[in-house]
Amino acid sequence: MPLSDVQIRNLKPREKPYKVSDFEGLYLLVTPAGSKLWNVKYRLHGKEKKLSLGAYPAISLSQARKLKQEARAKIAQGTDPSEAKQEAKRETREAQSHTFAKIGGSFLEKQRKEGKTQATLDKTIYHLKLANADFGRKPITEITAPMILTCLRKVEAKGNYETAHRLRARIGSVFRFAVASGIAETDPTYALKDALIRPNRKHRAAITDPVKLGALLTAIDGFDGQATTRIALQLLALLAQRPGEIRQAKWREIDFETKIWSIPAAKMKMRCDHNVPLPTQAVELLLELREISGEAEYLFPSLRSWHRPMSDNTLNAALRRMGYSGDEMTAHGFRASFSTLANESGRWNPDAIEAALAHVERNEVRKAYNRGLYWEERVELAQWWAGFLDEISAV
């Protein structure tokens, strides 16, 4: 005879567990402790099995009967409801373990194995820290576009519009990594593409007037701070490479015989090896620098540890100390100075100038062709530029 709620409430515990049946295999197991546990007895492939449904009253009589019917439907299809339940639990546990923080950590490790620069890794770490503060512990499949937008709005509210856009892109990279790994199905950041305030992008400040650039070079020559900082700025002006590449240059990359600085791909923004011809003036500066830091790994070691390069803020701070604001000149601006004045001279193939700046040609065939084609011209260009800087700083 089917059970009723009144009967179930009146069931009392005994010394030993006992069963009270409903119908079609559904029954309650009453334990000595007073618990009332729903179970369904069924047969599948000739074997008797049991499915646990939960405890009464958390699972009511009507709910237990509904769950029993669902189990019977699975049995009719040849599916074992007990195994299906265990599989669902396993999938839930797995999903709960795939948090954004964990997937983000795996994405960061992937970047390390790919040889991304330390600057790129540091940016990823910073962005993941911002995201993890809001939803790092959540399973990645439970994170929605509105959750991400809330995180981005916090950054945006501080006026850091560029950071907010970069953060959205980094979070999207983690989601796409999860999709490729079979952990997530979609990237919710795509829906936020037009949700953020667009920053007014500014080009890095640079001096392109020869007279003003000459004055800056004179100021650098008379810099009264660390000699290594002065030489770094002088090489930055002479070689027109990125500040990070100058700061992280190592002595083993310098060949004084061939007068070439060989920068490995791992340090380059475009992930390609880059050779820099060294004009006579640069070699002289490097010889001076070798007397100071020749025993260290880096040309420009940190003051705190010779096992690390100088801080990324050192060069810009030196320019500020000399009276040049961020709106007038930046460490990165020397590249624009070189590009503008070398092109304006009309003496050099624009492609050779681009090659000197390590602006990679995306067409692989043309890139390989150009690398050999412009080397001799780049050597001449480097020496011309060094001589040009000597001329304008002597005025």
Image (tube, rainbow, N blue to C red):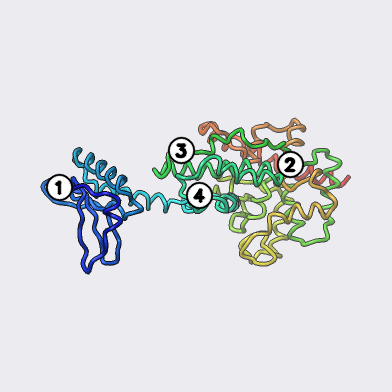
Residue 313, x across and y down, in percent: 72, 55
- What residue is shown at x 84% (from left), y 53% (from top)? 322
User: Splitting the image into 4 quarters, where does residue 226 fall?
Assistant: bottom right
Q: Which residue is mark 2?
A: 204
173 displayed left or right of 275: left
Cα distance in 3D space between marks 3 and 2: 36 Å
296 displayed left or right of 62: right
Looking at the image, which is closer to me, 280 or 94? 94
Classify mark 4: helix, strand or loop.
Answer: helix
Looking at the image, which is closer to me, 192 or 8? 8
Q: Amino acid at mark 4?
A: Gln
Classify mark 1: helix, strand or loop.
Answer: strand
Which numbered dot is residue 186? 3
Q: Which residue is mark 1?
A: 43
- In this rendering, the answer to whether 192 lies above or below 50 is above
- Answer yes or no: do the residues labelled 3 and 2 have beta carbons within 8 Å? no
Q: Which residue is mark 4?
A: 111
